[in-house]
Amino acid sequence: MTRNEIFRRVTGEVVTIPLRFPAPRTWWIMFAVTGTLTLLLFVSAGMVLVNGPGIWGNNIPVGWGFPIANYIWWIGIGHAGTLISAMLLLLQQGWRNSLNRFAEAMTLFAVACGGLYPIIHLGRPWYFYWMAPYPNTMDIWPQFRSPLTWDFFAVLTYLLVSAAFWYIGIIPDLASARDRATKRRWQVFYGLLALGWRGAGRHWLRWRQAYMTTAAIAVPLVVSVHSEISMLFAAGPVPGWNSTIFPAYFVLGAAFSGFAVVTMIAIVLRHMLRLEDLVTARHLDMLGRMTLATGLMTGYGYVMEVFTALYGGGYELETLQDRYGGPYAWTFWGAVLFNFVPLQLLWWRKWRVSPAAAFLVCLCVAVGMWCERYMLLVTSLYRDWLDSSINLFHPTFWDWSLYAGFIGLFLSALLLFVRFLPVISAFEIKERIEADDG
């Protein structure tokens, strides 16, 4: 097969997916399930708006419960998309080209889901704009020394830069979809999104400049965003949180969970859209290696957290002992079990390239990282400084329903992306083939 024939096959296979979707029945079944969960999200959010956050299990002293734990979990999932796309682009790693498009979309949807949690948690979400840097009617500015204000800027910046990076990268493939579309509505839809792209030399020059610049901006955001989120904990005096290892610990844990979710999405899309020749065993192997590497780094964070508690003693040691054997010990041991026991299978290539095995391992990682976020919050908060302030946290039905609803929103958005936009970067794959042949 000649190079031009290979190029036509790649373009046809990727760009024609939204035009002639290969698995409409499977898509509709999946969308019906995720759409039902999304409806549950609107019901749950409506109940919070009508009745207030009191319908959740939050109490005194556990003022932060499910909303913030799930917020951290969602933001963490979004980190792998930027790592795969921006960092590997700057490092000129060609294996990213089959993964970066849907990984970037996953980042957008995960960050959007995570960013909505603190807004709903406010109780009066229509006032969330008070966090913006402007003086209100009483001439009071936001408290810029508060980690909550840092949160506003970090997440908003990360979302905007990730959206710009994703959109810049997809423009050439939108133009290809426009040129291949036969129905007028698809030509108009893709034509508007392609912004008049014609593939001229100066188009490619400006595009490459914008793409690389945005990637260079996005990479440090991966570190800064979750480092800042860790400061919500580390900047306070609460036992179990006041640790200098938290920024690195959170960033590595975020990448760990993010690579796991990217792997699961890659496996599902590979099977559903029959993309085995584009998302190959090598891609699964590299994703498995990255998941294993970030998992081992996260495990090092667990060890250092134990060392810090043993070295510091006092309340830190009591909190550590409570995590091992207290009423929430299931969260700690659940995090250890799900995060690190199945992960050891990824030392062997045959398990990394096995779709079923890799999917189950990564699903365990996603569950384990949720247990870790829940553990970090609740085990440090439910025991206040006074014995009279001890109060267990029990999530209510509305806690769980809101969480399930956000999962539905995330998956629904991902399914809509898969259905209507090119899911793989065809032109970057062709660039790589050209470079390899050259």
Image (cartoon, rainbow, N blue to C red):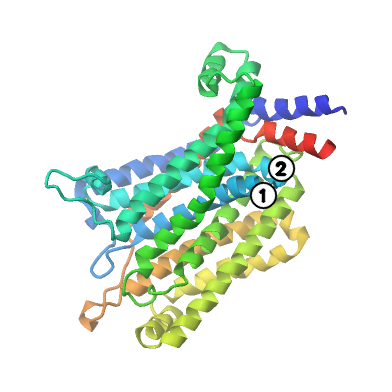
User: Which residue is rendered at x = 71% and y = 42% of the image?
Assistant: 279
Along the polypeptide, which appears first: circle 1 or circle 2?
A: 1
| Crowd band around label 2 with a 10 angstrom C-alpha radius: few (<14), some (14–19), many (20+) | many
204 over 283 or under it: above or below: above
Element assignment for label 1:
loop
Which residue is situated farthest in the right direction here?
A: 1
- Can you tell which quarter of the image residue 68 is in? bottom left
Q: Residue furthest left?
A: 138
Q: Where does the N terminus fall, quadrant-wise? A: top right
Query: Disc 1 versus disc 2: distance between alpha carbons?
Result: 20 Å
Which residue is disc 1 drawn over?
91
Q: Amino acid at mark 1?
A: Leu
Does dot 2 land on a helix, a strand or a loop?
A: loop
Query: How many numbered discs?
Result: 2
Front-lying residue, 420 or 429: 429
Q: Position of residue 139 (x, y in %)?
A: 14, 47
Q: Is residue 405 visible?
A: no
Relative depth, front residue between 17 and 312: 312
Residue 45 location, x and y as percent?
Answer: 30, 45
Kindly identify which residue carries mark 2.
279
Nearest the eye: 222 or 62: 222
The residue lying at 31 percent from left, 43 percent from top is 43
